[in-house]
Image (tube, grey):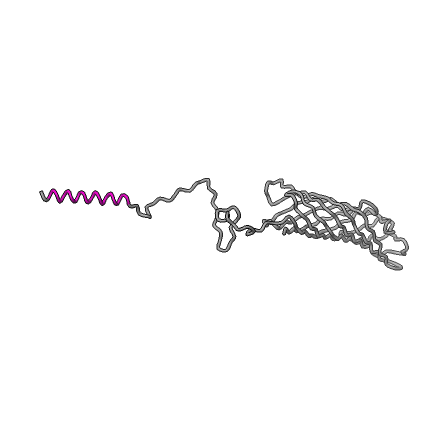
Amino acid sequence: MRRWGLFCLLLLLAGISGGLAADVTHPLASKPTPLDPNQELVDAPLPGQTPAKGSASGTNLAEGEIAELTPFYVRTGIGLSFVTTVDYPDFGLSGDVPFQPGFATGLMLGAQFHKNVAFEIEGGLLYNSVYQNQLSGISAAGMAGITNLQLFQVPMMGNFIFRTDPLADSKIRLVAGGGAGGIFRQMFITGGPNDVTRSQTVTAFQGFGGIQINPGEPDLMVDVQFRYLNSLAGQSVPSMSIMGTVTVRF
């Protein structure tokens, strides 16, 4: 009888210990929560790095912690200048003057007030000199002979620029625009009996087009443009240039 009682007691203790073991779950035995396949994976910021706005770790950034780019920019460039062969009666010259290719440079301050439209103020310099072996047939009033001609043009323009993105958020854009303003021109005429300097200031217009490349930085752009410049009144000097420019947003 005692044996049966002892056997029942052991069975009871075994059942109790089994129930307790079933209720206690080992920490390592828990299964990880399955990932949502549609959830976007966001890299955690590196130590010392500011989280991106809108990220999981950057939704509560302090105001002003991330600086936004202003619409203002500065642009500068350099290139080649070409002047069409014409005569220059306003400078006292007769006969077609064949200017050789020179250089062009410019400095622009602008505002990108729309993602596709900007306005800028431009100042620049175009320089060309005559072909030394093609001076025959050119004469200047009050001079016995000409040994050299140099033309400097300083445009001051206000431009509207239009940008399009035909490749859908690519790094390449098409750029076109135009403007109006004035040109200060100065012609240095070297010869006998004395050298002469003649100048004029006239209203002017220009048009341009090209491509714009963003190398990956939001505040930096590179342009390659073909530009046409001429006066609205006075001496007509059709001037073309091919210019590469760099734009910096700030």
Q: Does residue 222 appear to the left or right of 237 in the view shown?
A: left
Q: Does residue 61 appear to the left or right of 138 in the view shown?
A: left
**Residue 159's spot in the image, x, y percent?**
72, 46
Q: Does residue 6 appear to the left or right of 37 in the view shown?
A: left
Q: Does residue 4 appear to the left or right of 74 in the view shown?
A: left
Magenta stretch, main secondary structure, is: helix
Residue placed farthest to the front in the image?
Answer: 63
User: Which region of the structure is painted magenta?
Assistant: 3-23
Front-most of residues 64 and 34: 64
Quarter where residue 232 is shown: top right
Above or below: residue 189 compared with residue 9 = below
**Residue 236's spot in the image, x, y percent?**
82, 46
* Residue visible at 44% across and 40% down in the picture: 37
**Residue 53's spot in the image, x, y percent?**
53, 48
Residue placed farthest to the left in the image?
Answer: 1
* Residue visible at 84% across and 57% down in the picture: 190
Question: Could you tell me how many numbered marks the image carries?
Answer: 0
Q: Is residue 102 magenta?
A: no
Quarter that holds the N terminus: top left
**Residue 201's spot in the image, x, y percent?**
81, 50
